[in-house]
């Protein structure tokens, strides 16, 4: 029998507990890797939320996300943030609903979700 544990941060774990595990460090995704993965996250959102089409991002929204969201967020946080950006108004506008246009995420939607403060990492541990 094997026990597998995951942790975002092992600094709070005791030496005696760490002695019982083989610690394998997995590096975080780089900003470039997250940018490459983002279309797949958006595709998942479209399927899960049964959207009629994928959102479009303005250039300024992508720059804001690259500076403030991607460096400090997990893929789950990025996906959740994109959904919240859609819900701030772009997805719910009358033109999008009535005419089936692709929702546009602009810098105002990004600012409403991430604000000027950067997202802080959460430290958690889980067992499988």
Image (cartoon, rainbow, N blue to C red):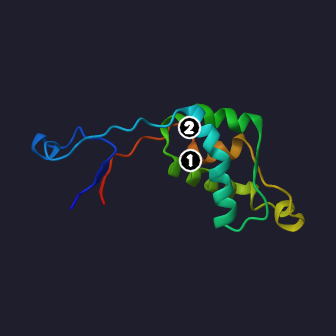
- For the residue pair 84 and 29, the one nearer the viewer reads as 29
Badge 2 or badge 1: first in the primary sequence:
2
Q: CA distance from mark 2 to mark 1?
A: 7 Å
Relative to 30, residue 22 above or below = below
Specify whether 72 is left or right of 88.
Answer: left
Q: Nearer the viewer, residue 85 or 54?
A: 54
Percent position of residue 62, x then y: 69, 37
List x then y, in percent, for residue 23.
25, 41
Q: Position of residue 41 (x, y in %)?
A: 62, 52
Q: Residue at x 75, y 62 (%)?
A: 92
- Packing grade of label 2 (10 A; few <14, some 14-19, many >=20) is many
Mark 1 neighbour class, 10 Å CA radius: few under 14, some 14 to 19, many 20 or more:
some
Q: Is residue 38 left or right of residue 13?
A: right
> Where, by quadrant of the figure, is residue 9 drawn?
top left
- Secondary structure of the residue carrying numbered label 2: helix
Q: Where residue 78 is drawn, which disc sits there?
A: 1
In the structure shown, which secondary structural element does the residue marked by tag 1 occupy?
helix
Residue drawn 33% across the image and 37% down it: 25
The residue at the far right in this view is 99
Tell me if label 2 and label 1 are in contact, CB under 8 Å: yes
Q: Quadrant of the N terminus?
A: bottom left
Q: Which mark is residue 54?
A: none
Q: In terms of depth relative to the viewer, which is nearer, 46 or 5?
A: 5
Residue at 52% over, 34% down: 71
Say left or right for 105 vs 76. Answer: right
In this view, the residue farthest toward the left is 16
Q: Quadrant of residue 46?
A: bottom right
Residue tagged 2 = 70
Q: Is residue 116 left or right of residue 9?
A: right
* Residue 61, percent from left and from top: 70, 38
Q: Is residue 113 above or below residue 60?
A: below
On the image, which quarter does residue 128 sit in?
A: bottom left
């Amino acid at each position: 029998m094997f026990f597998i544990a995951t942790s975002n941060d092992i600094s709070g774990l005791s030496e005696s507990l760490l002695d019982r595990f083989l610690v394998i460090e997995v590096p975080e995704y780089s900003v470039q890797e997250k940018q490459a993965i983002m279309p797949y996250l958006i595709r998942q959102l479209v399927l899960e939320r049964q959207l009629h089409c994928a959102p479009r991002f303005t250039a300024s929204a992508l720059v804001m996300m690259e500076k403030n969201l991607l460096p400090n967020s997990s893929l789950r946080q990025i996906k959740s943030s994109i959904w919240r950006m859609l819900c701030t108004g772009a997805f719910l506008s009358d033109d999008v609903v009535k005419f089936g246009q692709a929702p546009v995420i602009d810098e105002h939607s990004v600012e409403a979700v991430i604000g000027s403060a950067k997202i802080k990492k959460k430290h958690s541990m889980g067992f499988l």
